[in-house]
Structure formats: C-alpha cells, structure tokens
Image (tube, rainbow, N blue to C red):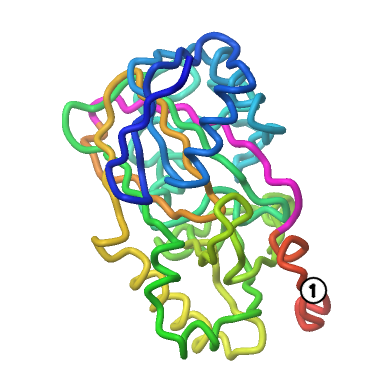
Amino acid sequence: MTITINPLHPDFFAEIGNVDLRQPVEPKTLGEIIAALDKYAVVVFHDQHLSDDQQIAFSAQLGPLETTRQTLRADYKPRLNTHMSDISNLDHQNRLLERENRRWMQGLANRLWHTDSSFKRLQAKYSLLSAHVVPPKGGDTEFADMRAAYDALSDDMKRRIEGLVVEHSIFNSRATLGFTDFVEEERKGLPPVHHVLTWTHPGSKRKTLYLASHAGRIFGMPVPEGRMLLHDLIEHATQPKFTHTHRWKVGDLVIWDDRCTMHRARDFDMSTVRDMRRTTVSDVAPTIEQAGLTVPREATAA
C-alpha cells in the first residue's frame, strides 16, 4: 500500500499517512518514507500512539540506534529504555520535576536551536519524537531547513565557509544559559568533537549547513570571530521563511533528518505534563569523513 504525502512547504516538512508504524514496515513502504525524508527533511505521522517497544522497533528499521548518553550523574534514575531520550518534565516515578531539578535546568538548552548529537563524534542521522502527553498550551517544536538556508547565502559567504571545521560540545549550549554544574567525570565522558560547517546531504545531494548551539569554535579563526560567524549563520538559517512550527497532538510521531535541519522546543507551563520520547538513529560515519576532510592539526593538539 502506497503512503500518502501532504507537503506543508514545497521542499520542507510533510505529513505522511496511510501507514501503521505499530506494525513492521515493509521494505517498499520504508523506502517511500526514506525518500520523503530525503526530500522534505521533516515528516509527521498522526494518530500512531506508539508504545516504547513499537517506537524502538520501527526506529531500528531506519538504522542503528543510539544509546542515550547524557550529562547525568550516577545517582540519576532513568524513566525510559536506554535507547530512548526522555524529553519530558517527569522523574522516574512520573512526578513533575521541580524547577530547581538539575535535569530540568540543563534541559532548558533544548530551547536553543540545535542539532541532536552534534556533540558526539558519530552524529545523529534521524531523530524520532513521539507525543504521549501534550500540554494544553505551548510546547511546540520549531524546525529549520538548513539546505534552503545554505542556498540563500551569498556566493561570497559560501566561499568563506567552505571547508571549515567546527568544534561542538554539549557544554557550550548549557553554558549559554549559565548552567555549568558538571563534574569532571561528565566532561571527560563527552569531550569536544569536530564537524564540518557545510557538506552535501547524502539523501538529497543538496548542499547544507551543519549548525547547532553546541558549536563553539571554528578552527583557523580567533574564538570571538568564529563564534560571531556561527551566530550570524544561525540567525540567517532561522528566519521565518526557512522554518516550520509543529503543534503537537497526542499520538504524533515526527521524524527529522539531523544532517540538514535544526530544531528547538518552545516554552510551556511546567505545572502541566509534557511527555515526549525520542529515539535516535546514528549516522554511518562522522561528517568530516563523509565530506572528505581531515581534523585540523590544532584540534588534535588541543
């Protein structure tokens, strides 16, 4: 049975129907979904109501799953399977997190424009986020099309940023909000990594920016100059003409291609529940290897 596709932009964000992801997806249908992701970068399936096991099983059909590794200390008690990221304001007993809770405070960085797992050497390929409980107001997710943003750059800017390598660290995004409460073990567990600033998206063969709030340094530039360039590029890439806001409904599953998008969560009343669960499919190789570049010597010496 052929899926239905309803584009919400010509080349960005689409609704997919006529498929039940609670059952194993046939190869032909899976190929159609991947082709839609290559074209639109973000797709939503309504009324899926997946269990955690069903979401994990479908995600695994798209590739190897990440095991969640967050900056959380040994006494942290997870609420979900280790192949799922807990994007909620609930603790392991399904109680609302207190405003001073450490996980809540550092998780506020999800409201910055970012790309999942860019702080890992092997970055994310796809993220799959399912809605279990949606707050009555707020809690939307915004997405930015980094291919369209690249296309709109001036030729001079395209030449300026070609071949640049960027250092990413999860501690950059947290420090932006003033959250620096990390012990040495956490910092050693997630050391800085290096990614290209531009590359060709493997699925669509379109050139794209690769940006995130985790990015903090461009090699070959003084730190302030590099950070200003990153700031300017993120500001450019998140103009309304490149973005789409998804307003969640319970049962939604949204998949996005982390290789050519950024996203951010929006504010909501934390006295209400927002229970979202993410699985993440790893990419096949680091961005630098796929782009045919090497890590700068100054990065390896750092």
Task: Look at the picture and state if 17 lies above or below 184.
Answer: above
Residue shown at 38% from the left, 28% from the top: 16
Apparent side of residue 200 relative to residue 145 in the rendered image (left or right): right
Residue shown at 46% from the left, 57% from the top: 179
Give the magenta part as a residue range: 271-286
Count neighbours of disc 1 (C-alpha within 10 A) and say few if under 14, some if 14 to 19, many if 20 or more: few
Residue holding disc 1: 294
Apparent side of residue 98 relative to residue 84 in the rendered image (left or right): left
Q: Is residue 9 visible?
A: yes
Residue 60 point in image, percent of width and height? 66, 25
Residue 96 point in image, percent of width and height? 34, 25
Q: Nearer the viewer, residue 289 or 35?
A: 35
Residue located farthest toward the left when viewing the structure as drawn? 137
Q: Quadrant of residue 296?
A: bottom right
Task: Look at the picture and state if 189 lies above or below 281.
Answer: below
Q: Nearer the viewer, residue 206 or 240?
A: 206
Task: Look at the picture and state if 79 lies above or below 76.
Answer: above
Residue shown at 51% from the left, 31% from the top: 33
Residue 235 point in image, percent of width and height? 34, 71
Apparent side of residue 137 relative to residue 1 in the rendered image (left or right): left
Q: Is residue 131 visible?
A: no
Count of all numbered marks drawn on residues in the image: 1
Q: Quadrant of the C terminus?
A: bottom right
